Structure formats: C-alpha cells, structure tokens
Amino acid sequence: MSLDRRQLLQTLAAITAAGNAHAVAGATTLTTDYHWPSAERIALWPQGAPGRSGYRAPALQPDWPAHFLRGIERPELHVFRPAHPDGRAVLVCPGGAYLFVSIQNEGLDVARAFNAAGITVFVLAYRLPCEGWNARADVPLQDAQRAIRLIKFKAADYGIDPQQVGVMGFSAGGHLAATLATSWQDTVYPPVDAADLLSARPAHAALIYPVITLAAPLGHADSTRNLLGETPDTALLAHRSPEQRVNGQTPRVFLVHAADDGAVPSAHAELMHRSLRAAGIASELHLYERGDHAFGIGRPGTGSELWPALYGAWLTPSGHGSSKTSGA
C-alpha cells in the first residue's frame, strides 16, 4: 500500500513539475464520486468555496485509484455516527502530500475504529491547493477551519459536546491538523454564516506520521511544493511550518510515528514534540521502531497497531501527559 502510494506521488510530482497535471494523454477528469458508505454529508461552502475562480479540474489516467481523491471542487464532511455516541468527536484529515486525499486507510478505516469507541467521526474531503485555487497556501486551512466550526455549530444534531471536538491528521493531513491546531485563530476567509462566529480551535490534535516543517533541510518536498508552489520564500515556509507557530493557545497534542518511515522521517514528529514542550503545551509522542508510512490505524505485527487504544486512553482526563514513549 505505502509503496503504491509513493509511486503515485512520484508520478504526479513529475507531471506537476512538467506543467501537465491538467493535460495527461488519455486521461479523464476525476471528481469526488468515490463510493462512500452510507454516511451523511455536510457541504462546507454551500455557495461555493473561496478562491474558486482559479480552480481547474485535474485530468488523470483512467486507472487512478478511486480512494485517492482529486478534483475536490466541493469540499465536504462525511459523518460517521457510532451506535452509542459518548459526546466526543474528531475531525479526520487524510493525507496524500496535498496532491490527493487518501480516504480509505486514513478516513473510512479510522471512522470504523473510533466509532466502535463511541466517538463521532467527521472525515474531511478537503480541497487540494495545487489545483489552481487562489490563495493556495490558505486553501486547506480554510476548509479545516470551516469544518470544525460547522461541527461545533451542529453539535446538538449529532449528540456531541462542542468542547470535545478534536482534529486528527495523517501525513500531509497531519500537517493540516497541526496547522489548524497552531493557526486556528488566523483569518483566512470571510465569514459565511453564523457558524463562522464560533472558534476554530480544536480541543486536541492527534498527528499520525505527520509532515510538520516545510523548511529545509527537513521539509517534505512534495507537500511543500503542492501547498506553496515551486519557489516559496522563507517567510511563507515559516508561516506554514506548524512547529514555528506553536503558542499558548495551541491545544494538547498526541503524536505517532515510526522510526523506519521512508516517506516522512520521524524527526518531524519529534520536532513538533520539542516545540510543544518548549511552549509548555501537553504533548505525548509514541515512536515505534517499525511501521513505515501510511499505516493508518496500524500495521499488524509492528506495534503501530497499538496507537488507537493509546489515543483513546489519552483522551480521558487521566490520560493527559507530556511524555515520550517508544514501541517495538
């Protein structure tokens, strides 16, 4: 799975670098018509997303995996309700280097796992900044801020506590979740309705094998290029590197990474952990020896499959902590 994902990223990176991401020979235009389970949907922008005048639908090969979404013109939340909701909720941001949104192992599988624990899950199909949107560096954060405000606004409809809405992200989705956690107060779009009067601050953030810094030498090249463009200046790189935006209003954070991650080094999670600790923000890091990248809710036999239970324990008041652990 992770190898296929890397190959896809390499192929698309080459296409994008050549300037042909919207004109691939023999390609078809794909949208978000993936067959989701019978989940409720919440449109983020009923009147159209901001910056849409620049949007161009991408054209991809017909055999492009349907669960790697591109062409997300109308971003939305997919709602997964547990049989017995306990008032907790989490906004889930799948990864994909800001080039696609990987909704199976980092979305649907996550929803099933945490629904079983009583948590209401909202999977975010967010816009991809490299598809021509105006103000590209703000596009994913616009969707994440709007999403968490809508969840809080509709909290009574879903039996959730608006003070217990967290965010969880994987890989580049981890960068988005970390950006929301550290830049929730930034004004990145004009208010649309009453939901935008609410705070976009998540109750907590869970960052799973996240991209964190975009700055050299550690910065993740694909995510940086797809979010910020080919030649971002140092100020923009710093502004969109969450470890540099940690502040006293940043919520507590749960981090997971594998030491053998061949796509996003575990140094990203460790960097964020250090920044949080330095700012006095509660942070817990689980670093596994094995697991590689894109393991979702865990790769059996590596130890990484333990993190969902650890996250569940951490969510309880007695599970707060500021520690670093490792697993084999």
Image (cartoon, rainbow, N blue to C red):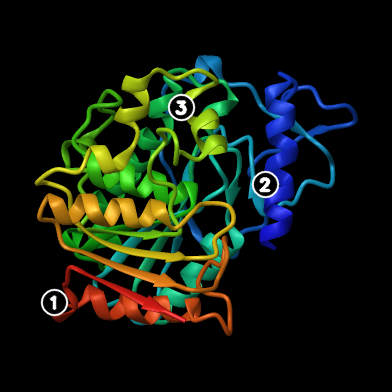
Q: Which residue is mark 1?
A: 317
User: What secondary structure is marked by label 2?
Assistant: loop
For label 3, the crowd category at 10 Å Cα-Cα, with few meaning under 14, some 14 to 19 and many 20 or more, is few
Residue toward you, 194 or 177: 177
From this viewpoint, which residue is outermost toward the bottom? 301
Determine the secondary structure under disc 1.
Answer: helix
Query: Which residue type carries mark 3?
Result: Gly
The residue that appears at 29% across and 29% down in the rendered structure is 192
303 vs 119, left or right, is right
* Location of residue 122 with respect to 137 vertically, above or below: below
Q: Residues within 10 Å of mark 1 (few under 14, many from 20)?
A: few
The answer to whether residue 206 is left or right of residue 218 is left
Task: Indicate which disc, 1 or 2, sits on the residue closer to the N terminus.
Answer: 2
Q: Position of residue 289 (x, y in %)?
A: 49, 74
For the view shown, which residue lies furthest in the right direction? 26
Mark 1 vs mark 2: give the one in front: 1
The N terminus lies in quadrant: bottom right
Residue labelled with disc 3: 48
Label at residue 33: 2
Q: How many marks?
A: 3
At horizontal 51% and vertical 52% (from top left) the residue drawn is 264
Pointer 3 or 2: first along the chain: 2
Residue 58 x/y as whole percent = 69, 29
Quarter-wise, where is residue 322 in the image?
Answer: bottom left
Q: Residue at x 67, y 54 (%)?
A: 67
Kindly report the distance in space between the C-alpha atoms of the residues bearing marks 1 and 2: 40 Å
